[in-house]
Amino acid sequence: MARKPKAQQRPPVTTTGTFRPEGGSAAAGRDRPVPVRQWPIVVVLTVVGVGLLVTALDAWRAGIVTVGVGLLIGAVLRAVMPEVGMLAVRSRFTDIVVMGVLGLVIVVLALASLPDPVIHLPFVGRLGSMVHSDGGGD
């Protein structure tokens, strides 16, 4: 009795086990070029890139605040737009919380960092004294 050759198994045309995040479709129609379709992530990455460039040019506080603002812009876009393309990574709630909290923390810490803080947080002075203490030994 001859064995029947195994049929070649092809991968499915579409993935069935992983779902696209809510709002993960392109922000503009498929007839547009990719940067236009994915404009929300392009905006966020551009603002963050400008912030990193400003930081590299030695205006560190303004650059870091710009990076934080870029993340806050991403959180707002994710919250108000129904489709944001590649800006959607997880669920809408998770994306908004992660980008919002990280953006807010980055902005607040950049404004409160020494020297010459713009805002004063009570724990920053204590952190500075702990870091710069001589340990009291030798």
Image: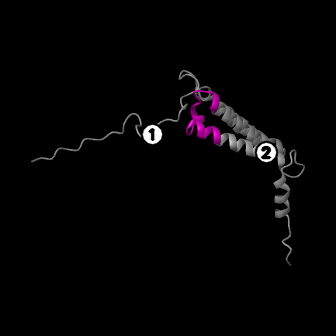
Where is mark 2, residue-wise? 108
Type of amino acid at the residue the image marks with label 1:
Thr
- Residue 18 image label: 1
On the image, which quarter does residue 46 sit in? top right
Type of amino acid at the residue the image marks with label 2:
Val
- Compared across the picture, whether 91 is left or right of 50 comes to left
Residue at image position (65%, 32%) is 42
Per the image, label 1 sits on a secondary structure element best described as: loop
Magenta segment: does it hold 94?
A: yes
- Compared across the picture, whether 60 is left or right of 96 comes to right
Residue at image position (38%, 34%) is 13
130 lies above or below 87: below
On the image, which quarter does residue 102 sit in? top right
Q: Main secondary structure of the magenta part?
A: helix
37 lies above or below 49: above
Q: Dot 2: few (<14), some (14–19), or many (≥20) neighbours within 10 Å? A: some
Residue 133 shows in this picture: yes
- Marks 2 and 1, the one that precedes in the sequence: 1
Colour mapping: one colour
Magenta segment: does it hold 16?
A: no
Residue at image position (12%, 47%) is 2
Which segment is the magenta one?
Answer: 78-97
Q: Quadrant of the C terminus?
A: bottom right
The location of residue 121, given as percent across then percent down, is 83, 50
Q: Dot 1: few (<14), some (14–19), or many (≥20) neighbours within 10 Å? A: few
Q: Nearer the viewer, residue 10 or 108?
A: 108
Label 2–label 1 contact, CB within 8 A: no
Residue at image position (57%, 22%) is 32
